[in-house]
Amino acid sequence: MSFDIVFTSIKLVKMGKLFLILIMGLLSLNCSENGVTNNDPGPVYRKIFSVERGLVRFDVYSSSAERYIYGYNELGIKVFLNNNEQNSGYVRFTPVIYKNAGGYRYNVPRSERFNFDSGNNMYSGYVIFLKDSLSYCKANFNYNDEMVIDSVDITIYSSEGNNILSWYNINHQKTFLLTLVKPVSPKVGLNPIELMLHSTTDSVSYEDVNNAEMFIKPWMESMGHGSSNNIHPTMISSARYRGVVNFNMTGEWQVYDSIKVNGEFITPSPPPYFIFQVR
């Protein structure tokens, strides 16, 4: 009788383990963000640049590419004073674009300050490089407005796709810039879409455009259809908007974005669009 009890107990333990594994599997499936394709397992930063003068050194890392690229750059910066890594204060990274040798200069949208992020142990921020074949770029590195390395030559490389859209709005007397952050490599299904919106009157300074309303429309021209289950991007932080775009088959897609600010459309008609190659 005692043997039967022990045998039955062993069977119950095994069944309990199988039930636990099954529950964990169901939970993992349910945590797929309502079916959104997980193309973003988390940022991986790679060192792309370093500059040193005197007692200070700046190391630049990017989670967007293996070098500075046209379009959106998610950057992290490490600062060393006398070879001691810093973890307080802030960094200002200021690229300046010169059109023709010594000629007209303009700035780019960027984080005003790179604040220290203990999660990745770097000063984190972004820069959006604008493409101009007749220009070159220099950058200023500034730690706490005390230690500065200025006029550093940097090279900007091409990136895939049309990841920056711009247009002039005569009513606002401004140029608006819409920058694609993600997806970079979209897949069939629901993909997170993240965009940044800025404006400028002179290409010297840029303003974050907040509280805009965005209405996205995916369209597959070759097949003459769109898709359902899209979520229009809403603001998640200054100038940054996030939503969901659905690509229901492979091929080339256009994603139109009609944008309102203060109840008025600022985009032209037809609205600007990004092109995605979905694989």
Image (tube, grey):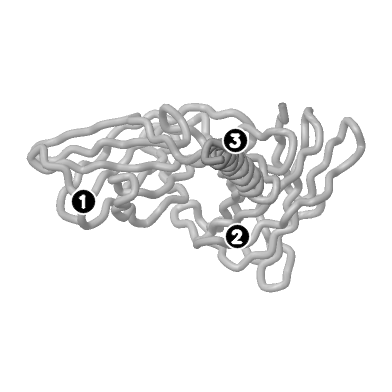
Label 3, label 1: how far apart the Cα atoms are: 31 Å
Given the image, on which type of amino acid does mark 3 rest?
Val
Which label is found at residue 184?
Answer: 3
Q: Decide: marks 2, 3 in contact (CB < 8 A)?
A: no
Q: Position of residue 87 (x, y in %)?
A: 21, 51
Which label is found at residue 87?
Answer: 1
Asked if 115 appears above or below 81 in the picture, the reply is: below
Given the image, on which type of amino acid does mark 2 rest?
Lys
Is 166 on the left or on the right of 225, as rendered? left
Q: Nearer the viewer, mark 2 or mark 3?
A: 3
For marks 3 and 1, the one nearer the N-term is 1
Given the image, on which type of amino acid does mark 1 rest?
Asn
Q: Residues within 10 Å of mark 1 (few under 14, many from 20)?
A: some
User: 78 or 32: nearer the eye?
Assistant: 32
Q: Residues within 10 Å of mark 2 (few under 14, many from 20)?
A: some
Please name the residue shown 56% across and 65% down the image: 210
Please name the residue shown 29% across and 53% down the image: 116
Residue 139 showing in the rendered view? yes
Label 2, label 3: how far apart the Cα atoms are: 28 Å
Q: Quadrant of residue 248?
A: top right
Q: Residues within 10 Å of mark 3 (few under 14, many from 20)?
A: some
Q: Position of residue 180 (x, y in %)?
A: 60, 44
Q: Position of residue 224 (x, y in %)?
A: 92, 37
Asked if 233 appears above or below 192 in the picture, the reply is: below
